[in-house]
Amino acid sequence: MCLGIAGQIIEFVSEPRDLARVSVFGSERVINIGMVEKEGLACGDWVLIHVGFAIAKMDEGEAKASMAFLQGMGEAFTAEMAAAWDEENDETNPKTKNES
């Protein structure tokens, strides 16, 4: 299974032409757009990125849905870890109570 993230093209890097600067969740990075370059990319377009390569062009609706899904996964993971941490450090929990 692979994970792709949505990024919006900010600008094209002049040399080599197969690179573009994109915004991903507010962070900027340079990615390779060579695999989707023939799809007529323009500044403002959204692409699906996997390990630094644009692998597909997406519309804004797909990009926003993808980003919302990933944010939701992050929040669920964070909540699960917080609950596990609280349980682990709860001195009243008989499973974790430290008896000396």
Image (cartoon, rainbow, N blue to C red):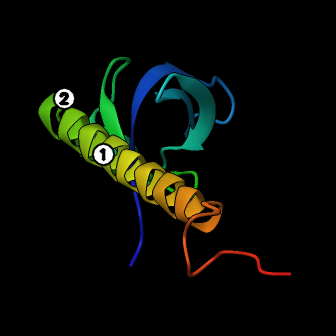
In this view of the protein, can residue 55 be seen by the observer? no
Q: Measuring 38% from the left and 18% from the top, which residue is drawn there?
A: 43
x and y percentages locating residue 76 in the rendered image: 35, 53
Looking at this view, is 66 or 15 the one in front?
66
Looking at this view, is 19 or 44 the one in front?
44
Q: Disc 2 on helix, strand or loop? A: helix
Task: Answer left or right for 13 relative to 69.
Answer: right
Task: Answer left or right for 17 relative to 23.
Answer: right
Which image quarter: residue 16? Answer: top right
Using a 10 Å C-alpha cutoff, classify the residue at mark 2 as few (fewer than 14 neighbours), some (14 to 19) or many (20 or more). Answer: some
Q: Disc 1 on helix, strand or loop? A: helix
Instruction: Say which residue label 2 marks.
Output: 60
x and y percentages locating residue 56 in the rendered image: 30, 51
Nearer mark to the viewer, of 2 and 1 = 1
In which quadrant will I find the N terminus? bottom left
- Residue 77 vs 43, above or below: the answer is below
x and y percentages locating residue 79 in the rendered image: 42, 50
Q: Measuring 39% from the left and 45% from the top, which residue is drawn there?
A: 75
Looking at this view, is 75 or 4 the one in front?
75
Task: Answer left or right for 12 relative to 13.
Answer: left
Residue type at the position of mark 2? Glu
Looking at this view, is 13 or 23 the one in front?
23
Give me the disc on residue 72. 1
Mark found first going from the N terminus, 2 or 1: 2
Give me the disc on residue 82. none
x and y percentages locating residue 66 in the rendered image: 25, 45
Residue type at the position of mark 1? Gly
Which image quarter: residue 6? Answer: top left
In which quadrant will I find the C terminus? bottom right
Q: State the residue lying farthest toward the left.
A: 61
Using a 10 Å C-alpha cutoff, classify the residue at mark 1 as few (fewer than 14 neighbours), some (14 to 19) or many (20 or more). Answer: few
Q: Label 2, label 1: how many angstroms apart (C-alpha)?
A: 18 Å
